[in-house]
Image (tube, rainbow, N blue to C red):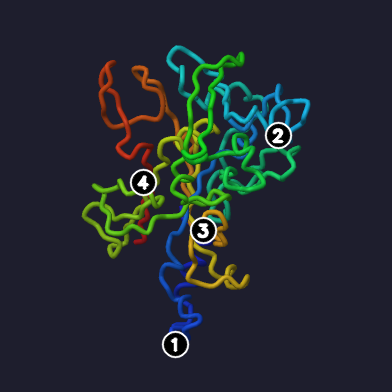
Amino acid sequence: MFTKEFGEIIVDALTVNPALKELPSVSAILDTSNYTFNAITYGKDAEGFNLHGHTVSSTQYVDGDSASGVSGYNNGDFFTVNYLNTASFVSSYEVSGTQLQFSSTYNSVPAYPSVEHTRLESESTQTTAALSYSATPPDLGHYPNAWLDSDLSSIWNILGGFAPPSSVGAIYQLLDSEGTQITSGVLSGIYNQNGVIDKDGYIKISQVSGLGTSLLAELSGGPVVFSAAGLSPGQGVTNIAVVPQYSDSVTLALFGGVNHIGVHCLDLKSMLALGITPPFSWDALNNNRKYKMVAKVTMLDNLMKHYDFNRGAGVLAGLSYLNTGWFTVYANDGPTFILKFNFL
């Protein structure tokens, strides 16, 4: 669904003064890249930011309390309690189990989409369980990337939603309702590894061009814009391939999954008012880009739903073989979501 801010981008593109091309100091304002899709975000139901992997263990302490012997929440590990621990759900996390466990107080329905929305969730998405921490958790309407925030990196395992790169790594634990470990593993985030996500969870759209539906493997630069089979952007149809790879799909699933995907353009007027002028370079550590949410996709069902199959746990599709037999794996090493835009 397009939002009203998409209309604002169209108006800005059609009304910008072409005479600016004669002024070298500001001619870059006319660059078409300033008006195209620039970032995506992931989101879920607002109240879910205080459940799932966001839950703070009652046995741990915060802010490096000397009496606790730990340096942060949950002893620095990332854990999620699986309330639907059955023989068929051993090392997968079923979000519906948590929804059922807390159904009397937990409104797990994501915000119904509206053209008036300027963020994925209108209600607060602040992880209030972490308010006692020395830095204030964000309220963005979508998943933050706390690991890259210098003030919040030590509690990324509570705030979410993306794992540190392989050079840092992180331990995750999946527990049953009694607190017993079901499974564990080491996480390394691809978005952070490739430097395509900032601290506020905006994932840069790749500048790779000329891709068709048969070639979606070039994902190191972030989500990819491509043309539908047999069509071209000139015919009014284009697509974005969104693929959370490897541990990014794991953390998103364990933090409660994905119900929204937001698409963002640059808020050019806002940046110019702040004295930020094009060309706008990308810096994941200190991203000064401002965005407008121009479209959103909302699903009541969780996009990160997954299951165990022949002892191969996790979010799987495609086809491969283990000694247990054939099982499915994703060709792009993660679930592939195709966002289609028909401008006709």
Which one is closest to the eye, mark 3 or mark 1?
A: 3
- The residue sitting at 46% across, 38% down in the picture is 166
Q: Which amino acid does label 2 sit on?
A: Ala
CB contact under 8 Å: marks 4 and 3: no
Alpha carbons under labels 2 and 4: distance apart: 34 Å
Q: Earlier in the sequence, mark 2 or mark 4?
A: 2
Q: Where is residue 294 in the image (x, y as percent from the top left)?
A: 49, 58
Q: Which amino acid does label 1 sit on?
A: Glu
Q: Where is residue 240 in the image (x, y as percent from the top left)?
A: 37, 52
Which one is closest to the eye, mark 1 or mark 4?
A: 1
Q: Relative to the observer, which residue lies in front, 83 or 288? A: 288
Q: Relative to the observer, which residue lies in front, 75 or 296? A: 75
CB contact under 8 Å: marks 2 and 1: no
Residue 156: image tag: none
Alpha carbons under labels 1 and 4: distance apart: 40 Å
Q: Position of residue 333 (x, y in %)?
A: 35, 37
On screen, residue 253 above or below 216: above
Which one is closest to the eye, mark 3 or mark 2?
A: 3
- What residue would you read off at disc 1? 22
Q: Earlier in the sequence, mark 4 or mark 3?
A: 3
- What residue would you read off at disc 2? 129
Alpha carbons under labels 4 and 3: distance apart: 26 Å
- What residue would you read off at disc 4? 338
Q: Earlier in the sequence, mark 1 or mark 4?
A: 1
On screen, residue 65 above or below 115: above
Residue 283: image tag: 3
Q: Which amino acid does label 3 sit on?
A: Asp
Element at label 4: strand
Badge 3: how crowded within 10 Å, few (<14), some, or many (20+)? few
